[in-house]
Image (spheres, grey):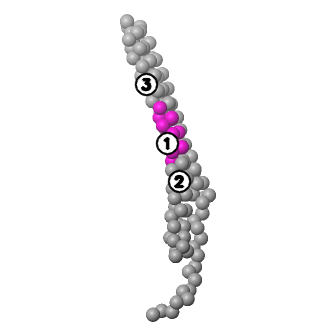
Amino acid sequence: MTDLLHDLLGPSKALAVQAHKANRVTLANLERLTAFQMDALQAYVDLGGARLKAAMDIHDLGGLITFQANHLRLLMTLYEKLIADARALADLGVAFKAELDRAGENEAAPPQTAQAPSSRKAA
């Protein structure tokens, strides 16, 4: 009876270990992703706030021309930041997949044992 119970629970223990490893990797990745998103959000908020302040400083035509010239430079900077953020996000995804793959490789599936022939005769 204990052998039967052991045979039934054995695979579920291995599954629980794998699920625990996957959960740890997922949580670590979620923390990195959240930190990345919070940093990106802060950078974009700061950028928007700086533009609002610059717009408030327009008092004449010369100020408007300066604002527009700076705005074009800002758009190029924003474009570069968006590209860099997209690459960083893709790198996070690739690293997450690699970590999950490594976690799965460390714990090989338990070998399947052949069932010994029953000593009972068929009725």
Kindly indicate the quadrant of the structure image that contains residue 48: top left
Q: Which label's residue is closer to the chain start, 3 or 2? A: 2
Above or below — where is 5 with respect to 48? below
Q: Which mark is residue 77?
A: none
- Chief secondary structure of the magenta span? helix
The reply to whether discs 3 and 2 touch (Cβ–Cβ < 8 Å) is no
Q: Residue at x 56, y 86 (%)?
A: 117
Q: Is residue 94 magenta?
A: no
Magenta span: 26-38
Q: Quadrant of the C terminus?
A: bottom left
Crowding at dot 3, Cα within 10 Å, few <14 / some 14-19 / many 20+, comes out as few
Q: Residue at x 53, y 39 (%)?
A: 32
SS at circle 2: helix
Please tell me which residue lies in front, 55 or 49.
Answer: 49
Separation of residues labelled 2 and 1 (CA atoms): 15 Å
Q: Which mark is residue 45?
A: 3
Separation of residues labelled 3 and 2 (CA atoms): 37 Å
Nearer the observer: mark 3 or 1; the answer is 1
Q: Position of residue 1 (x, y in %)?
A: 52, 76
Q: Which residue is mark 2?
A: 20
Q: Which label's residue is closer to the chain start, 2 or 1? A: 2
Crowding at dot 2, Cα within 10 Å, few <14 / some 14-19 / many 20+, comes out as few
Q: Residue at x 37, y 6 (%)?
A: 59
Q: Which residue is mark 1?
A: 30
Question: What's the amino acid at mark 3?
Answer: Val
Q: Is residue 36 magenta?
A: yes
Question: What's the amino acid at mark 1?
Answer: Leu
The reply to whether discs 3 and 1 touch (Cβ–Cβ < 8 Å) is no
Q: Position of residue 81 (x, y in %)?
A: 50, 30
Nearer the observer: mark 2 or 1; the answer is 2
